[in-house]
Structure formats: structure tokens, C-alpha cells
Amino acid sequence: MSNKIVLPSTLFETSNIDDEVLVSLYKDMLLGRNFEDMCAQMYYRGKMFGFVHLYNGQEAVSTGVIKALSDNDYVCSTYRDHVHALSKGVPANLVMAELFGKETGCSRGRGGSMHIFSSKHNFLGGFAFIGEGIPVAIGSAFQSVYRKQVLQDHNPLRVTVCFFGDGTSNNGQFFECLNMAVLWKLPIIFVVENNQWAIGMAHNRSTSYPEIHKKANAFGLPGIEVDGMDVLAVREVAQKSIDRARSGEGPTLIEALTYRFRGHSLADPDELRSQKEKEAWLARDPIKRLKNYLINNNIVSNDMIDSIHIKTKQAIDDAIDFALSSPEPEVKDLKRYLFADDDNKLN
């Protein structure tokens, strides 16, 4: 049942996606990249604390998958969650304020980098431990079925997307939840962002079966491998998987082959990966690839690209200003948001 799909460049050559959608994909990836670059600056200036894991290089996966979802669909992330949240529509100023630990943050400053959350945008959070979000995503997918079958919801079936890394694919939650998803035909898509490294451990050294998408065979769901540096290839695979889930046909496992351009976190000196390996992946930068496609096919001009970059930079600057000017949480509210009630709901 495993479907191996590796599309390094063919979709850029044959794309029939609307021009406006293509530009919106570029804007989303650029926002994510600029946001993360600014996070690095703020972290080294002492404005952010704790561990901060950046997403540079993997933008095609977030944009390609999440921008194919509807507003009512759900996303469950990892500790590398900033860009997933932005793609799902969580405003940049709320995410940045959260990273600064401010009361105006999307988690009221209580979560920080690894715990971005927004109920308004159906963003179910980042999680500090690997594999921690997969059972949560299973619960989300189950409630979609319950809402439809028991509560008689007449709206389209809501789909849940669960992101995690290659290192997580060796953990028990991964296998348990694949089994449960197939057993109950849940509307969920498991997206493995295989960036080749689990912190400092190379993927092919840590698993007896490196091709993660083929592990779907054991549970009877489609397993698809895709070029995670090609946003159009990711989007096509994601759209088919979303349509399948929404029609009640059950889950799909997508393995997106990608690469992070920075260390595991901003505290990581990144000395274990070879310079040759880094340069090979940097040459396949997903944002540059889409930019070249847009210009070479006369979809946008260089002036339009420059305008997009200026507006994106301004949005990031505005997010920084918002975060800096926002109030700190008050000591008297230390125990607030521990329990759910009408007065203590997060955004």
C-alpha cells in the first residue's frame, strides 16, 4: 500500500495552481523565514529565554500542508512550532509576544517558544517532548468523527494534521496512534518532517528501517514520500490526503524529506553536520526555488518580489514593537489559566 512519490522539480514545471495562490504560498514561506531570523536576533539579545528551535529550511512543508487546509481544520505541532502557527493564521504579533513571555501572547506568556496555542485558529499547540502531540491529534480527529456521527454536524468533516520529526518515528506513540487511526478511520494526516537529524543523531544511524513512509504498510494506510523542499509537490500530496480524510476514507502518512538550515536549537553550535551536507541542502532552498519559478514564468516581477519582502519585513518589525511594548504577566495571576472556566480562556 506504500506509495513512493519523490517530486524534486516536476510540479514546478507543470503547476496549474492559480497565480494568486502561488504568490500567497511564497508570502507565507517568506513570513516564516523572516520571523525565525528575527527570533534568532532577539534570542541572542536576551529578549527570549529557554530553548528556541527554528524552522529555517522546512517552510515548504508547513506552507504546502497547512495552506491546503480549511479554517475549521486542526493542526498539532512540535517544539519547532512558530511557523506552523503562522501558516495556520495565528498573527505574528501574538506569536512574537508569546516568545517574549508577554501577557498579550497567544498563550498569555505562559507557554513560550515550545507551547504556541490558539483555540481560535484550531492550532492545538506545540509540545516540548517528541511524540507528545500525536495522541492529542488522535483525540482531535476522533472528536471530528463524533461531532459528525453523534452530534449530527452537517458541515464537512474536519481534518487534523499532526507534524513530527524523524526521531519521533521510533517512539511508541507513533505506532500506537497509526494503529488507532486506521482502526477507527480517523480523518488525520501524519506528517513526518524528516530533516535527516534527530538533534545530533543522523536519521540513518538511529533506525533499522530509514524509509519512514513504508512503516505505514504494517497498519494498512497509505505511506507517501515527497520532496519537502518543493512546496508545490508537498501541496499536491497534502491536498490528496486531505480530500481522502475529509471523505471518510481515513488517515495518510506523509514523509517530507527536508532539512533545517540552523542547529537543533539556538543553543546548538551545529558542529556535527558536515559543511558539504549543509551546502547541498542550502542549494535547494524552497523559498528561492519558488521565487525563481514565479519570476521565470512571469507570474510576478522583481519589483513585486521586492514589495513583498518590504511588507514582510514591516510585519515582523511591527510584531517586535508589539511584543516589546506589551505588559508582563502579573504575579497575582500566577495560578490563572491552570483550570478552564469562562474567565480564563486562552485565545
Image (cartoon, rainbow, N blue to C red):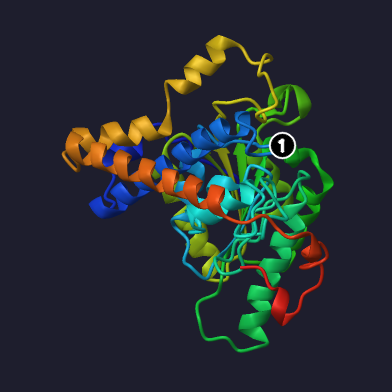
SS under mark 1: loop
Dividing the picture into quadrants, the one containing residue 251 is bottom right
Can you see residue 214?
yes
Name the residue at 56% across, 71% down: 158
**Nearest to the observer: residue 171 or residue 330:** 330
Seen at 47% across and 42% down, the residue is 32
Give me the residue at 61% from left, 28% from top: 44
Observer-nearest of 44 and 218: 44
Up the image or down, 243 lies above or below 278; here it is below
Quadrant of the rendering where the C terminus is positioned: bottom right
In this rendering, the answer to whether 285 lies above or below 225 is: above
User: Left or right: 252 with respect to 63?
Assistant: right
In the image, residue 112 sits, relative to residue 335, either above or below, namely above
Q: Quadrant of residue 310?
A: top left
Q: Nearer the viewer, residue 237 or 160?
A: 160
What residue do we see at 54% from left, 31% from top? 41
Q: Which residue is mark 1?
A: 51
Q: Is residue 245 left or right of residue 64?
A: right
Residue 185 in sight in this render: no
Crowd tier of the residue under label 1, counting other residues whose Cα lies within 10 Å: few below 14, some 14–19, many 20 or above: some
Q: Position of residue 133 (x, y in %)?
A: 73, 54
Q: Is residue 308 left or right of residue 325?
A: left
Kind of residue at disc 1: Phe
- Looking at the picture, how far across and down is residue 220, in whole percent? 68, 54
Pinpoint residue 38: horizontal percent, then vertical percent: 50, 36
Q: How many marks on residues?
A: 1
